[in-house]
Image (cartoon, grey):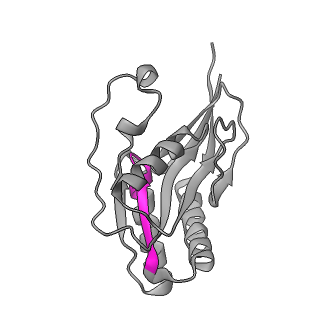
Amino acid sequence: MVQKIVSILSADEIRRTLNRLASEIIERTGNLDKLVLLGIYTRGVPLAQTLADHIQRLENIAIPTGALDITFYRDDLDKIGVRTPAKTEIPFDLAGKTVVLVDDVIYSGRTVRAALNAVHDYGRPDAIRLAVLIDRGHRQVPVHPDFVGKVLPTASDETVRVFVSGVDERDGVELTQT
């Protein structure tokens, strides 16, 4: 079986994409004083921080960020095996806020469903939005991201890998075709 790896986004393209996503979040959120970003472990956390940095540079306002672990909310633990949960860090009250969940890739939508359940255990925000770097389709639950970096139609046997500095040694997005 031969695998072909195709580069989808370079580090510069990711930077520009996140800058555009930050601008879209600013435009569509309205009151930035009520905006918070929650990154979904693992790669959503540094992506959320990067988006917050872009927003601060563009609007001169610090956006609170947090990290959300969804391990115990997943419905596929029997398939993915044992995982060590990360620490959810939400150092602010969610009540009255517009929460933007941030993740690297949306595929089936099950991660987002788990994240929505997790968020509600920490408070009741006014609104929850979803920002993803890559939307690869193939939903199994009815969720749709509000902010999308790149729509990447894929076959179900293909794999999308996102690399983010701080977690990985580099920034980039690759598609592996079998």
Residue at (73% x, 41% y) in the render? 153
The one of 11 and 132 positioned closer to us in this rendering = 132
Residue 108, above or below 152: above
Residue at (41% x, 60% y) in the render? 38
- Taking the view exactly as shown, the residue that stands out farthest to the top is 1
Residue 91, above or below 160: below
The one of 61 and 118 positioned closer to us in this rendering = 118
The one of 39 and 1 positioned closer to us in this rendering = 39
| x, y percent for residue 159 | 59, 31
Residue at (49% x, 85% y) in the render? 59
| x, y percent for residue 175 | 62, 36
Image-quadrant location for residue 97? bottom left
| x, y percent for residue 150 | 66, 54
Q: Quadrant of the N terminus?
A: top right
Residue 87, above or below 19: above
Residue 9 visible in rendering: no
Number of numbered discs visible in the structure rendering? 0
Report if residue 95 lies within the magenta region.
Answer: no
Q: Quadrant of the C terminus?
A: top right
Q: Is residue 126 left or right of residue 70?
A: right
| x, y percent for residue 64 | 36, 72
Residue 159 visible in rendering: yes
Q: Which residues are magenta?
A: 34-46
